[in-house]
Amino acid sequence: MSFDFRALSGRPVIIGGGLAGLVTALEMAPEPVVLLSAAPLGYEASSALAQGGLAASIGSDDSPALHLADTLAAGDGLCDEVVVRRVVEAAPAAIAKLEHFGVAFDRATGRGLHLGLEAAHSRRRIVHAAGAATGSELMRALVAAVRRTVSITVVEGFEARRLLVEDGTIAGVNAAGASGDLVLATSRVVLATGGVGGLFRDTTNPLGCFGQGLALAARAGAELADLEFVQFHPTALDGPQRPMRLISEAVRGEGAILIDETGRRFLADLPGAELGTRDTVARGVHRHLARGHRVFLDTRACLGASFAGRFPTIASYCSEAGIDPAVDPIPVRPAAHYHMGGVAVNAEGCSSVAGLWACGEVASTGLHGANRLASNSLTEAVVMAGWVAESVAASSSMERKTIAIPAAAPARADPALVRSIVSPALGVLRDGESLRDAASTLLPLARGSTSAAEPAAVALIMVVAALRREESRGAHCRADFPLRSAVARRSKITLVEALETAAAIDATPLARSA
């Protein structure tokens, strides 16, 4: 299909074809919007890979207050309680909304929703679909809903490369595709571009997810928050495939245990054991691997022959690797999975740049704190998408008669070079020396114009944020600062600040040798 792109001028532009972007577009109907996606809808989005589901206090023994308490506990002192309360109270309605859009959730006998248990949840409150293929079902239903909604113009195959800013306000989007460059004039842009897992060698995210939205926002001058907090999922299938296959936390919720090659349950003394918070379980697995052990998830006693029926998607992953979970323990290791940090936004998803909103994993709302509670992310994406849509619709469109057209879009990004720098420096365990070395290495790349520039810029801001946080809290663990500070504080940073800090670090050795 071809478009007269000039006819789209002035419409809100939603960048990203995952859960947050699709729901935002649907919620804005019948206002005409543009949904810009680098890949065909349903592809290359982390949402499609989600297994566990959405957390919502639907059970008769559950309540928003309990969901709130669990979220705050997992967030290790850094959650915004007002945001958490608002999201968990809206969660049950979000499930109903998704069903309205055509999502078929799993139901138990009696037709009620089947609720799963995941780590650090005090109740069964995880709503899932197709066993552990929730993301796939979400994308199937929502993509179909978007395609039949006439107010949504889907532009596929064009990647947003720059946000155009005039007088401190969004003026347009510079994108590029196989047929050339494209400029969409608009004063309203929503970032829904996902996370940063593609910056790491071991990741469950699509390899192209390097933080594109963060790069767009940072170059536009937006403030970013809590970028140092990267959640490593403790049980990714240990093998050569990238992205790594996720062994859902729901498997541990059904009773699976972690053992080593000797059969020892090495995390039995951890608070919550295998159902402890993700940060503590990931560190426990990481340290055991560092001691030379192998780590396995053992489902033989709790699920046995019923594994494939309960988790058909994971069973197929295991089968591809020559593993039968009914008789074989599953080899696992931690992998970068979710970014708690992102574009700093308020309760309506507004960033510090006029005309720029963000929702989903690219945004930092304060819900997740220092460590996301399992299955809160999909819930947040749906809930925040509704609030963002309301805010965008209520804002006035500022038509511009002229817009400065850039000579050319920046080069297509490639995070491959950056992975070798980020993976050791921003891993499960960190230290100041490695972070400073990474900052010095990333600085010239971020300042350059090669395909590594945008991933390097995102990584540099994350590294500087991690260097500034001289404590261990949630998913951020510093070997040189192992204690948690008495006062919890969220971090805020801009690209300019990160570049200045890295330049000062880079100059320090020269000053010492003078």
Image: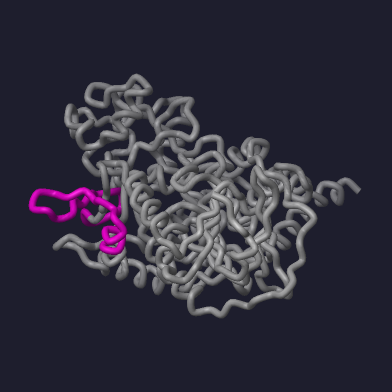
Residue 348, image x and y in percent? 47, 73
Residue segment shown in magenta: 96-124
Residue at the right extreme, as displayed? 514
Tell me if residue 107 is in the magenta stretch. Answer: yes
Residue at the top extreme, as displayed? 322
Residue 83, image x and y in percent? 41, 71
Question: In the picture, residue 304 is in which quadrant?
Answer: top left
Q: Nearer the viewer, residue 360 or 77?
A: 360
**Above-or-below relation of 506 to 385:** above
Taken as a whole, is the magenta stretch helix, strand or loop? loop
Residue 341 visible: no
Residue 497, image x and y in percent? 71, 62
Numbered marks: total: 0
**Above-or-below relation of 170 to 135:** below
What's the residue at 78%, 51% (across, down)?
447
Q: Nearer the viewer, residue 70 or 34?
A: 34
Left/right of residue 87 with respect to residue 154 in the rendered view: left
What's the residue at 40%, 51% (across, down)?
143
Left/right of residue 43 with respect to residue 97 in the rendered view: right
**Above-or-below relation of 76 to 246:** below
Q: Nearer the viewer, residue 497 or 220?
A: 220
The colour scheme used here is: one colour
Q: Nearer the viewer, residue 435 or 348?
A: 348
Left/right of residue 364 with respect to residue 59 in the rendered view: right
Residue 212 visible: yes
Tell me if residue 509 is in the magenta stretch. Answer: no
What's the residue at 26%, 26% (across, down)?
325
Residue 283, image x and y in percent? 44, 42
What's the residue at 41%, 57% (across, down)?
146
Left/right of residue 112 with respect to residue 499 in the rendered view: left
